[in-house]
Image (spheres, grey):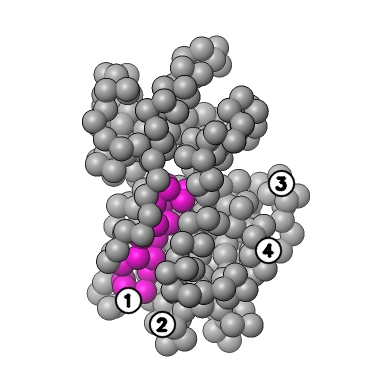
């Protein structure tokens, strides 16, 4: 098996919890991957800036340039020094989604988050506790009075519902809007509305073209519905044992351990580096 690119989701997959991963252990693995000319990709619903900050400790090991990024569930693709792709929702798409939310009786208490290139936007009623929570995943969180008056390019709209309700709303919004937009659930309890055809698999294809890497040279890890496209596309695709039951129904090849036991790193060590 020849692997040249390894992509991993973050929350529920690579990260053991919060923003935690064993930096020293990962640096050792990353150094071994570098020797084999294998790229590592952080592929997440988190924004690019958040992912870059998450892996900035690799700079002290002189390994930061070995990491590429797929942010906002595929809306943004970047290497260490180059933005390869960024796809945005149109104002009309944003307005349509927000109108649906306004007219949905079950949306009264949900939180709306718009992710842009310059910041993350929430409504004025968001509490400080909510803003602090969002800051874990999104950079530069700002309150706004009117979403449609935001002067920024919007990568996606996220609705935050109780985690157990996410898949219900993913299916509901997909049925309403069809193929005009892409709808997926993320690892931290949100329903993400993205531009058409935006997903992690299509984002990885951009990196593959950039580096000249074939599909059978890619390994991926994920745990949630925003990982389904890449889990189904690639031969070397591993679902985390800690994933929800509906994910195990969709994909049966598992990583060697759950996220809290560094399952991604253990699988890489066994399948690629041994």
Q: Position of residue 5 (x, y in %)?
A: 50, 73
Q: Answer left or right for 152 relative to 202.
A: left
Identify the residue under disc 3. Answer: 245
Q: Which residues are magenta?
A: 64-80
Identify the residue under disc 4. Answer: 254
Identify the residue under disc 1. Answer: 63
Whole-angstrom CA distance, mark 4 to mark 3, is 13 Å
Check if residue 65 falls in the magenta segment.
yes
Whole-angstrom CA distance, mark 1 to mark 4, is 28 Å
Whole-angstrom CA distance, mark 3 to mark 2, is 35 Å
Query: Along the polypeptide, which appears first: circle 4 or circle 3?
Result: 3
Identify the residue under disc 2. Answer: 34
Residue at 36%, 59% in the rendered image? 84
Q: Which mark is residue 137?
A: none
Q: Are marks 1 and 2 in contact (CB under 8 Å)?
A: yes
Q: Answer left or right for 245 relative to 151.
A: right
Whole-angstrom CA distance, mark 2 to mark 4, is 25 Å
Name the quadrant of the C terminus. Answer: bottom right
Task: Name the image quarter holding residue 87.
Answer: top left
Q: Are marks 1 and 4 in contact (CB under 8 Å)?
A: no
């Amino acid at each position: 098996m020849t692997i040249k690119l390894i992509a991993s989701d973050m929350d529920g997959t690579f990260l053991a919890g919060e923003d935690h991963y064993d930096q020293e252990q990962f640096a050792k693995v990353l150094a071994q991957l570098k020797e084999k000319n294998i790229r590592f990709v952080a592929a997440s619903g988190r924004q690019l800036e958040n992912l870059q900050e998450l892996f900035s400790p690799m700079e002290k090991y002189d390994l930061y340039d070995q990491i590429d990024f797929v942010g906002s569930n595929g809306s943004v693709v970047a290497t260490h020094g180059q933005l390869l792709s960024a796809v945005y929702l149109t104002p009309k798409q944003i307005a349509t989604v927000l109108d649906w939310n306004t007219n949905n009786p079950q949306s009264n208490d949900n939180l709306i988050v718009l992710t842009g290139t310059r910041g993350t936007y929430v409504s004025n009623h968001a509490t400080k506790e909510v803003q602090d929570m969002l800051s874990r995943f999104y950079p530069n969180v700002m309150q706004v009075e009117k979403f449609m008056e935001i002067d920024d390019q919007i990568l996606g709209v996220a609705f935050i519902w109780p985690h157990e309700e996410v898949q219900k709303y993913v299916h509901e919004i997909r049925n309403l809007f069809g193929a005009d937009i892409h709808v997926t659930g993320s690892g931290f309890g949100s329903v993400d509305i993205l531009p058409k055809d935006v997903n992690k698999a299509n984002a990885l294809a951009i990196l593959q073209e950039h580096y000249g890497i074939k599909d059978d040279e890619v390994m991926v890890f994920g745990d949630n519905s925003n990982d389904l496209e890449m889990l189904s596309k690639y031969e070397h695709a591993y679902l985390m044992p800690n994933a929800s039951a509906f994910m195990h129904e969709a994909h049966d090849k598992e990583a060697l351990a759950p996220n809290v036991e560094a399952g991604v790193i253990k699988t890489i060590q066994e399948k690629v580096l041994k």
